[in-house]
Structures are given as structure tokens and as C-alpha cells.
Image (cartoon, rainbow, N blue to C red):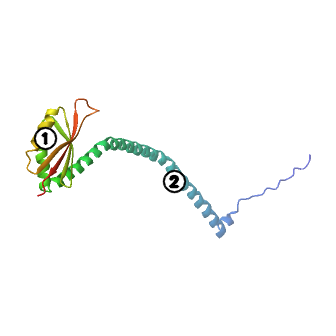
């Protein structure tokens, strides 16, 4: 028989003396520390991955809430516009009411309206009042002109325009021009 050859083995593990030396202890500490760092990093990555689902759900809820509130705001936009317009008109009216004689004159003009006459516009410039109104019949227009003649501060009344309203048949739109006495 042929003699059995003995294989040489290489041992890459350090001997016990290496582990008890300074280099061996430092190497063992570094390897165990990096193992802990890797484990902690993996835990942080897993927490971040799992929290993404919670954050996505929260983001979706917030987007839905924003859409619903936006819808509510859009629904109230017309109301707010009308409300602001009414506030502006009230402000102009209260300023005009507090201006003394002119406000009393406007009040007298509006108090003398027959039941089927509706004012649409009143303007005042250089002692001339321009009044636009709507009526359902000509008799009411005539009665309104007679009523305006009873106001002492108005000296001349003229019917400067009369026409049928194209949008609403049976309604007459008329314009009166009145001069005021300079007091």
C-alpha cells in the first residue's frame, strides 16, 4: 500500500493568545459593535418602512378633508359675494342717510312711490336728481310724478325717457329728471 499523505491544514482563526492581546480585543470589540450598529439600523429602517403606511393614510385623510372644505368654501362663495355686496350697499346707504338734507330728500322720494312702482337707480349731481324706476302701468307713473311735485325742494320734474322692458313684457321702465332748489 502506498503511504497516506498527510494534508496540511491552514487555521485562519487566531489562537487564544491573539484574542487576549490588544489587537485581538479591539478586533473583537469592533466586530461586535458593528453587529449591534447593523441591527439598530435595520430596526430603524423597518420602523420607517412601517410608518410610511400610517403617514400615507394620514395624508389621504388630510387630502379628503381639504377637498371637502374646498367644496364647502366654493358653495359659500356666491353667498359671501352677495353678503359683501349687501354690506357695501348698506355702508353707502348709511353714509347717504347721515349726509343730512339729501338723505331726507331721497327718503321723501322713496316714500311717495305708488305700490306698483319700483326704484332701480337714483343719482344726484349738481342739484339734478336722475331717477330710474319700473312700473306695471302708466297711471302709476303719472301718479308718482304728481306725488313728487308735492316735495318743496324739487322745482322741475321731467319725464326724460320711457320704454317697455324687453326682458319682462308688461313692465315699463322710465327715467325722471328733477332739479332741486339750492338751499
The residue depicted at 49 percent of the width and 50 percent of the height is 47
Above or below for 110 versus 163: below
Between residue 45 and residue 123, name the one nearer to us.
123
**Residue 106 location in percent, x, y?**
14, 49
Q: Nearer the viewer, mark 2 or mark 1?
A: 1
- The mark nearer the N terminus, 2 or 1, is 2
- In three-dimensional space, the C-alpha distance between marks 2 and 1, rounded to whole angstroms, equals 88 Å
Q: Residue 66 shows which numbered tag? A: none
Q: From this viewpoint, which residue is outermost toward the right?
A: 1
Q: Are marks 2 and 1 in contact (CB under 8 Å)?
A: no
Is residue 154 among the parts visible in the rendering?
yes
Between residue 162 and residue 93, name the one nearer to us.
162
If the image is split into quadrants, where does the C terminus sit?
A: bottom left
Give the residue number, with chain letter if any, for mark 2.
44
Count the marks.
2
Above or below for 53 versus 11: above
**Residue 95 location in percent, x, y?**
18, 55
The residue depicted at 56 percent of the width and 58 percent of the height is 37
Quadrant location of residue 111?
top left
Is residue 113 among the parts visible in the rendering?
no
**Residue 178 location in percent, x, y?**
17, 48
Give the residue number, with chain letter if any, for mark 1.
145
Quadrant location of residue 26?
bottom right
Label 2's element? helix
Q: From this viewpoint, which residue is outermost toward the top?
A: 169
Label 1's element? helix
How packed mark 1 is, by other alpha carbons closer than 10 Å (few <14, some 14-19, many 20 or more), is some
Between residue 21 and residue 156, name the one nearer to us.
156
**Residue 142 location in percent, x, y?**
13, 37
How packed mark 2 is, by other alpha carbons closer than 10 Å (few <14, some 14-19, many 20 or more), is few
Amino acid at each position: 500500500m502506498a503511504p497516506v499523505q498527510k494534508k496540511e491544514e491552514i487555521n485562519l482563526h487566531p489562537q487564544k493568545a491573539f484574542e487576549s492581546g490588544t489587537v485581538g480585543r479591539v478586533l473583537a470589540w469592533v466586530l461586535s459593535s458593528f453587529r449591534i450598529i447593523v441591527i439598530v439600523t435595520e430596526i430603524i429602517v423597518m420602523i420607517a418602512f412601517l410608518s410610511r403606511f400610517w403617514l400615507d393614510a394620514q395624508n389621504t385623510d388630510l387630502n379628503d378633508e381639504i377637498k371637502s372644505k374646498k367644496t364647502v368654501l366654493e358653495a359659500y362663495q356666491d353667498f359671501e359675494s352677495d353678503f359683501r355686496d349687501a354690506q357695501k350697499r348698506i355702508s353707502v346707504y348709511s353714509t347717504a342717510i347721515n349726509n343730512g338734507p339729501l338723505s331726507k330728500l331721497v327718503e321723501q322720494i322713496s316714500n311717495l312711490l305708488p305700490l306698483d312702482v319700483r326704484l332701480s337707480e337714483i343719482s344726484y349731481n349738481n342739484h339734478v336728481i336722475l331717477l330710474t324706476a319700473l312700473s306695471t302701468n302708466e297711471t302709476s307713473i303719472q301718479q308718482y310724478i304728481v306725488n313728487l311735485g308735492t316735495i318743496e325742494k324739487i322745482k322741475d320734474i321731467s319725464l326724460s325717457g320711457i320704454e317697455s322692458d324687453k326682458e319682462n313684457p308688461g313692465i315699463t321702465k322710465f327715467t325722471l329728471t328733477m332739479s332741486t332748489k339750492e338751499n
